Image: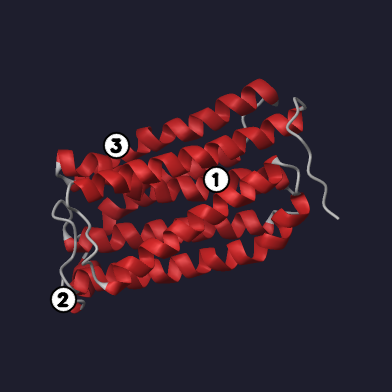
Amino acid sequence: MATVAAPGTSALQKERAFFFYMALAVVATVFAGFGFNFAMGGSTIYSPWWVHLHALSMMTWVALFVTQNWLVYRGNVAAHRTLGPLAAGWAVWIVCLGFAVTAMDVRTHRVPPFFQPNYFLVMDWLNMIVFGGLVFAAVRLRNRAPDWHKRLMLGAVLNLLAVAWGRLTLPIIFDERGLWLEIPILGAYFIAGMVFDKRTRGAVHPAWFWGWGALAAWIAVSFAIAWMPPVMSLTKSLGG
């Protein structure tokens, strides 16, 4: 039977608490970003079914992420591991659905006005690839390197937060180049992890650099390839 440990002050418990609080920060960011988007009329209950399916799927993922961190924070590692395969499978679903929904948005001309369709297509797909890659690495390292596992999982979710922060910044800037702001904005979350590690472990864990570097990479690559002929042709074939 799993035991539930009351929060203490050990180094391990402090680390578990940190990741749980970071998960709560993720939830707060999601509500802020999508709440602002809804208030600005960027999303309504009359959106197509696939938009609602995507929203429900992403909400479920965030709920799973918070639950997994809460279980570890409370010391119920056995339940965390039991729920792990479901969370991993849901991440696969998120990636597949993300590819399909982005294509449908381009096909039905539902691309946000501050994005060109070709850039929107590449940006979202690369974001999904990075998210999936980080989750895959985290799952592979869950047993032999739990320190990497938890940091890579958080890094994967922080990459997804570009969508939430984009809804806060891009409607104001109204230019897809504003996505560059996501690197320093989301970098604050990664820096928080680095500072925590430095204070509690004496050194910054390299997983933070992988997560933040992946964010900078997919944003930079999006701008680098979005206007290449093959991408333009693909976008045109989808109706964009």
Would you name the residue on which mark 2 appears?
239
- Amino acid type at image mark 1: Leu
- Amino acid type at image mark 3: Leu
Q: Nearer the viewer, residue 143 or 65?
A: 65
Using residue 197 as the reference point, say whether residue 43 is left or right of it: left
- In percent of the image, x 47 and y 37: which residue is there? 25
Upstream in sequence: badge 3 or badge 1: 1
Q: CA distance from mark 2 to mark 3?
A: 29 Å
Query: Which of the 4 quarters of the picture holds residue 140?
Result: bottom right
Q: Is residue 35 above or below residue 205?
A: below
Do we see residue 226 in this rendering? no
**Mark 3 and mark 1 residues within 8 Å of each other at the beta carbon:** no
Q: Position of residue 40 (x, y in %)?
A: 17, 47
Would you name the residue on which mark 3 appears?
181
- Amino acid type at image mark 2: Gly
Query: Which of the 4 quarters of the picture holds residue 129?
Result: bottom left
Using residue 199 as the reference point, say whether residue 133 is left or right of it: left
Image quarter (top left, top right, bottom left or bottom right) of the N terminus: bottom right
Q: Is residue 36 above or below residue 93?
A: above
Q: Position of residue 152 (x, y in %)?
A: 58, 47
Q: CA distance from mark 3 to mark 1?
A: 20 Å
Upstream in sequence: badge 1 or badge 2: 1
Image quarter (top left, top right, bottom left or bottom right) of the C terminus: bottom left
Disc number lying in front (1 or 2):
1
Would you name the residue on which mark 1 appears?
154
Q: Nearer the viewer, residue 46 or 235?
A: 46
- In percent of the image, x 21 and y 67: which residue is there? 46
Disc 2 is placed on an element classified as loop
